[in-house]
Every structure is written in structure tokens, then in C-alpha cells.
Image (tube, rainbow, N blue to C red):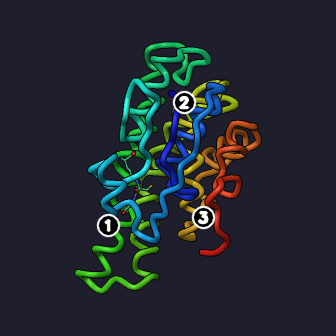
Amino acid sequence: MSARLYSYYRSSAAYRVRIALNLKGLRAEIVPVHLRHGEQRGEAYRALNPAGLVPWFTDGTVALAQSLAIIEYLEEAHPAPALLPAGLANRAYAREIAHIIACDIHPIGNLRVLDKLSADHGATPEARAAWNRHWMAAGFGAIEARLEQTAGAFAVGDAPGLADLCIVPQLYNARRFGLDLSPYPRLAAVEAAARALPAFIKAAPEHQPDFEEGP
Ligand SMILES: N[C@@H](CCC(=O)N[C@@H](CS)C(=O)NCC(=O)O)C(=O)O
């Protein structure tokens, strides 16, 4: 069975998996799920993924949610090229950066959280953006400090991997929400290096079949 990735062009969690697939040279059919139209909450999609979130990945062996679980699965199923760096400590640092983004920053800036803030507390579009900027800045400060120790050409050493594929989509979100990135020069440098690579270019929102212009 050929692989499928249920994705939304500007879902940063799906973007992580798209980059991982590309770095490993794996093909997957992109199946768009329109988050702004609520397709993720529809009966058809929930029959696949009861969590009602993207990404969702299937390949005949697994049918799996959670970007980091999917990426770890790909890493184990297709070890080369590796997404985790050599060395016990560096692998832990790469996971630390990934977890700051995927566990600390992303969940509280997600669409359903912002919608709940608006529905229950009247958060305006500007209040939603300010909320997101606050939590991104908190996480980015920690990553910037770690990069002083770990960064080479990329976030942890000189090969692109797990940390970079989390950083690039999160910085895409940061720009969407108007975060000033000037306090994070190392993050910006790592992002620029990664975004120049074909695996990252192909995974970018503007190169997805469901890409839409606009805010
Ligand atoms: N921890 C999950 C997060 C998945 C997630 O929250 N995806 C977002 C898009 S980035 C989503 O589907 N949001 C839909 C919604 O909030 O209704 C992962 O890493 O895959």
C-alpha cells in the first residue's frame, strides 16, 4: 500500500512530517484536510483519526497520529539518512528542541485553543495573535540558548534533522502571528540554512496542493 499523509498546507505539525518524508526520500500521497472549513472535525475524518487533528499517516503497516510519533516511526522503519544526530547527548538535545516546540509551544497556539479563547473569553484576532506570540517567545528563548551549544550548519551539528524540521514550521507560524524574530539570530540562521534545502522547499506551505493565498 502506498503511503498517505493527511495534511493541511499551513499545519506546522503536518509540515514537520512532510519535511521528514522528503529528507528520507520517501513518497506519500498528500490528502488535504481543510482545517478552516472544519473537515478535521467531520465524521469522515474522525472515522480515520478520532483526535480530529492533522497529521494522520498511513502506509499499510501503521495508521498513526502525532507528528513526532510518525517521524520516529519513519526513523525506525527507514534509518538512513538519520534524522537524529550522532552521539547520545546530541540526540537528546535534538529531542529537547523538538519537544519545546511540539509539547510546550504548539499545543497552546493551536486553532482549537484559539477558537476556545475567542468563544469563552471573547479573544479578538489581535488577542489571539498576542497569546501566540507570548508562548512562542518563551519557547524560542530556551531554544536560542541551546543552539549556542549545539548549532553547526544546522540546529544540532552539520546535518539537517529532527530539530530543524520542527524549527522551520514553527518560525513559519511565528511570522504569521507577527513575532519579532530579532532576539533569535541563531534560530533565524538555522532556519535559513534548512529552508534552502530541496526537502524543506518541497514541504513548504506554498508548494502544497491545498495552498491558499491569504492570512
Ligand atoms: N501534537 C499533535 C498536534 C496536531 C495538531 O494539533 N494539528 C493541528 C494543525 S497544526 C490541527 O489539526 N488543528 C485543528 C484544530 O485545532 O481544530 C502533532 O504533533 O501531530
Residue 6 in the image: x percent, y percent? 48, 47
Residue 2: give its label: 2
Q: Residues within 10 Å of mark 3 (few under 14, many from 20)?
A: few
Q: Quadrant of ligand 1?
A: bottom left
Residue 89 in the image: x percent, y percent? 44, 19
Residue 73 in the figure: left or right of residue 118: right
Q: Residues within 10 Å of mark 1 (few under 14, many from 20)?
A: few
Residue, disc 1: 113
Callout 3 secondary element: helix
Q: CA distance from mark 1 to mark 2?
A: 33 Å
Residue 127 in the image: x percent, y percent? 40, 80
Q: 32 or 146, which is in the foreground?
A: 32
Residue, disc 3: 175
Q: 209 or 171, which is in the foreground?
A: 209
Residue 183 in the figure: left or right of residue 74: right
Q: CA distance from mark 2 to mark 3?
A: 34 Å
Which residue is depicted at the point 46% across and 82% down?
126
Residue 182 to residue 191: above or below: below
Question: How many discs appear?
Answer: 3
Residue 158 to residue 147: above or below: above
Q: CA distance from mark 3 to mark 1?
A: 19 Å
**Kind of residue indicated by mark 3:** Arg
**Kind of residue indicated by mark 2:** Ser
Which one is closest to the eye, mark 1 or mark 2?
2
**Kind of residue indicated by mark 1:** Val
Residue 162 in the image: x percent, y percent? 52, 32
